[in-house]
Image: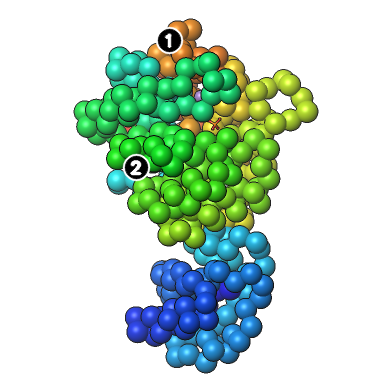
Amino acid sequence: MLIVMDAHATAEQIARVCDEIRQMGYQPHPMPGPTRTAIGVTGNEGAIVQTSRISSLPGVIDIVRITKPYKLVSREFKEADTIVRVGDLPIGGPGVVVMAGPCTVESRDQLFASARAVLAHGATVIRGGAYKPRSSPYSFQGLGEAGLRLLAELRQELGVPVVTEVLDTETLPLVEEYADILQIGARNMQNYSLLRAVGRSHRPVLLKRGFAATLQDLLLAAEYILVEGNRQVILCERGVRSFDQHSRFMLDLGAIPVLKALTHLPVIVDPSHAAGQADRVIPMARAAVAAGADGLIVEVHPDPAFAVCDGEQALVPHRFAEMMQQIERIAAALGRPVLGRSPQPTHPA
Ligand code: PEP
Ligand code: MN
């Protein structure tokens, strides 16, 4: 249920409505908007009866029933796009944001070389896993805290935010200390205790779609984070399992417009894990931007043949540069800048 307050409702009137909701045994979620505040209600299992207890309060102008199983993430709840702010970087606004870097942090040299290469072409967030969710327990599991320290050094020296995966609730306090954005990987999308824990964090969260998850599963997973109080969530389509084996995963491009209609949260795309092979990453990146993605997260490695993890899908820096040029033109056709790119002249001299 959503309670719409009058544009002139006072702070006291909003607080009074929140109190009444609590007394009824539910949780209020006030959401100030550009013109008025709306108050979301969660905690009810069925329809809320006795709505007159709220509709009769001063300042309340409407009560809207939310028909979807997810509430706080839905457009019904909040019409305006959520802009997730990472420092000065707005994710989910008109600008397209590109996050890039290696699959995993291997060494200082490798991390800094990847970061410098992608920053030169307009990446605005550096990715790199310190804790890796590997299908095999015998594969490289990440540098752990040493990897986090390298990411922190990078942020300090190059002044760029970093996104890194948090695998479990035990390491969350540590990862939270170092990361600007907490990544929840596809394999953990339905790890509800982890979702609730990052929901209590003050860091933005990048939530990747599980590879057998429906969009409703994804939105309900995001709801776990928002209901704990953290509204800074970015959704990421990264490909789903398909009957065909031609790609590592099948990028669900159709998910982009559907998610954009169902939720106010930013939606970005990971073409690297979907494609699984470097030569297919750029076409998928172009398609994602054309379909309305708010950003991309792309794996780039200075020397993919020597990559410890996911080398086959890593772009070399000059291919990343080509990708950036191409998506910039596609984004421009849609009236969107690619953040981090200096404006290109329309008529070359
Ligand atoms: C990653 O981003 O490195 C990763 C492991 O992705 P996913 O969780 O989508 O497989
Ligand atoms: Mn990877």
Image coords of residue 169 (percent x, y)? 44, 42
Q: Residue furthest right?
A: 243
- Is there a contact, CB below 8 Å, between mark 1 and mark 2? no
Amino acid bearing label 2: Pro
* Residue 319 sits above or below residue 8 on the image: above
Answer yes or no: is residue 198 visible.
yes
Q: Quadrant of the C terminus?
A: top left
Q: Considering the numbered disc 1 on the image, is that residue within a helix, a strand or a loop?
A: loop
Q: Is residue 196 above or below residue 145?
A: below
Q: Residue at x 34, y 81 (%)?
A: 11
Visible residue check, residue 124: no
Give x and y (percent) for residue 117. 35, 20
Q: Is residue 1 left or right of residue 172?
A: right
Q: Give the side of residue 336 with respect to residue 282, left or right.
A: left
Percent x, y for residue 126? 37, 30
Q: Secondary structure at mark 2?
A: helix
- Residue at coordinates 38% horizontally, 17% vertically from top-left? 106
Q: Amino acid at mark 1?
A: Asp
User: Which numbered marker is on residue 183?
Assistant: none
The residue located at (68%, 45%) in the rendering is 214
Q: Which residue is mark 2?
A: 173
Between residue 51 and residue 311, name the one nearer to us.
51
Residue 9 x %, y %: 40, 84
**Mark carried by residue 303:** 1
